[in-house]
Image (cartoon, rainbow, N blue to C red):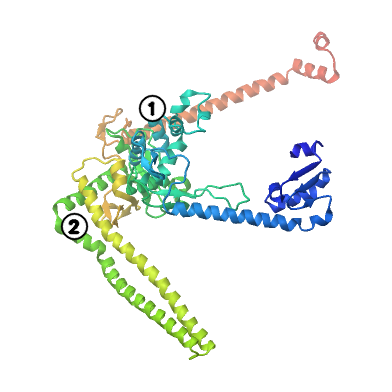
Amino acid sequence: MIKDIESGLINCVITKDLSRLGRNYLDCGLYLEVFFPEHNVRYIAVNDGVDTLNKSAMDITPFRNILNEMYSADVSVKIKSAYRARFQQGKFMGTTAPYGYVKDPADHNHLLIDDKVAHVVREIFDLALAGNGIAKIRKHINKQHILRPAAYAAEQGATGYERYFEENEENRYIWSENSVRGILRSPIYAGNLAGYKRIAANMKSKKRPSKLPEEWEVIPDTHEGIVTQEEFDTVQQLITSRRLPENKGGFENIFAGVIKCADCGYAMRAMSANRRKRPDIIDCVQYSCNNYGRYGNIMCTAHSIEARDLFNAVLTDINRFADMAVNDEKAVRAIEKRLTETDQSKAKALEKEQRKLNKRLAELDRLFSSLYEDKVMERITERNFEMMSGKYQKEQLEIEARLKEVTETLSDSYEKTQGVRDFLSLIRNYQGIKELDATIINALIDKILVSEREKLTDGMVRQEIKIYYKFIGFVGELHITPTKRWTALKPKNCTVCGVEYVPRSGISKYCPACAKKIQREKSNESKRRSRERNRQACIELSAKNDRLTSPSAKAVSSARATRIPLSMCTAM
């Protein structure tokens, strides 16, 4: 219609009332005051008695537009409140169920697990828990020729998805990284309802920017989860961690996202020394601080640790705790006491304080009631009532704030005590393990902090490792003696002099003395070749100068200067 008005096809617009023109008073004012007059268009709102030809009837029109917008805003608030109330009751409000679920036939606001594809969701989470990245999971799923979520929804009768597959039928089986990431990020699969992931600033704005996952509103335990809450939390931690890719040499970085620098907190990267030939790839890899790798010792130091040393230290510590949890009940109680003793003594003091605060709150309530009664009965003046009530109210607010803090601290203390029991129950499953993988690491460990190597007074070198386990956190540091990189290589004979020596790399052929001599000879040969090239260049330059100073060259130069043809110059 606007295009027709601009082209002159329409000269009058009629609506039932002003609200039919619009409920945004700024836009309505623009049309009525600017756009319509500029294009000689008459506007009539029948029920409101508005006619742009009647100027007196237009005086109250701006107020009508404001009232229309206020009505629209009021309706918007009421609708949003109704939706939020249903969301907070744990009701699913989506038009279609998420992948892996179906709507309950008895209650469309409740989700049931879809047994047809739930195993796919379970497999995606298992792959993530095993340390695989989103791209790797996507490739694995695509190899199985499984319908992507949009294609599966279309197959189940949902509308609006077929446009994705009209041009290429094979697209039905091609998963995107966003699909995999969406499943791994969604609290739905842990049995929680998540909402308000995108929200507009106000009803006028059409933009709905996405919120960070930690800013989503989540209602727990609204339906049966495909994965446990612990598994979901572990996957979120793995996704948000700075994960380093698999080494080119085939090394599986099972500590990715877990190992950190103890000083700067940056992730530590796995680096392979390609010159070091070892029977196992793990013996060719060491970890070092990523902050140091990017900026040098201005920001941090290397904190280097051999992958084999780290692997052995972590494996030994896990087996130590597992054996203790299974065979040594006395040691288990000692660990539990050591980890929770401080919290338990602190909890007793906090419980005592909590009882005292609750008692005082009850007293203040009685004092308020008595004070109000005295005011009503005119036993005290208004001034005294306000002074005393203000004092009581201030104390009440302070007590409520402190009570909230005490309650939260007590809750954390109880959770830690339960966490020790959960950890001991979990680690019993890993007694006697011989190898580590990403699944074990991610199930048991939150993070590993590696300190810089330190030299002791006796000349020995040691390195401190701190392991923070799930549920219980830090228990005690480990100290290892770093392995020298070349100790795993066997002695060999120099190919020049035949002397036996310990090589520092797998491709070494010469003993240190011969290697130095050969390097010196190579350097001398390089210098000799450089001098020869310079001498040859001087000879060529001298010959060129001789040609330029010869009689024939001078004649040619003179001919060019006087524009004489070259044939005449030759005849002369």
Nearest-to-viewer mark from 2 and 1: 1
**Mark 2 neighbour class, 10 Å CA radius: few under 14, some 14 to 19, many 20 or more:** some
Q: Amino acid at mark 1?
A: Lys
Q: Position of residue 228 (x, y in %)?
A: 32, 46
**Mark 1 neighbour class, 10 Å CA radius: few under 14, some 14 to 19, many 20 or more:** few
Q: Amino acid at mark 2?
A: Val
Residue 545 sits in quarter: top right
Circle 1: element type: helix
Cα gap from disc 2 to disc 1, whole angstroms: 46 Å
Q: Looking at the image, is 545 positioned above or below residue 312? A: above
Q: Position of residue 506 (x, y in %)?
A: 31, 32
**Mark seen at residue 143:** 1
Left or right for 226, reference 537: left
Residue at (50, 51) in percent of width and height: 83
Q: Looking at the image, is 107 positioned above or below residue 536? A: below
Left or right for 241, reference 474: right
**Mark seen at residue 253:** none
Q: Looking at the image, is 448 positioned above or below residue 251? A: below
Residue at (44, 81) in percent of width and height: 368
Camera-nearest residue between 319 and 502:
319
- Please state, as top left, top right, bottom left or bottom right, where the C terminus lies in the image: top right
- Please state, as top left, top right, bottom left or bottom right, where the N terminus lies in the image: top right
Camera-nearest residue between 357 and 234:
357
Residue at (41, 72) in percent of width and height: 400
Residue at (39, 40) in percent of width and height: 105
Which residue was labeled with disc 2? 332
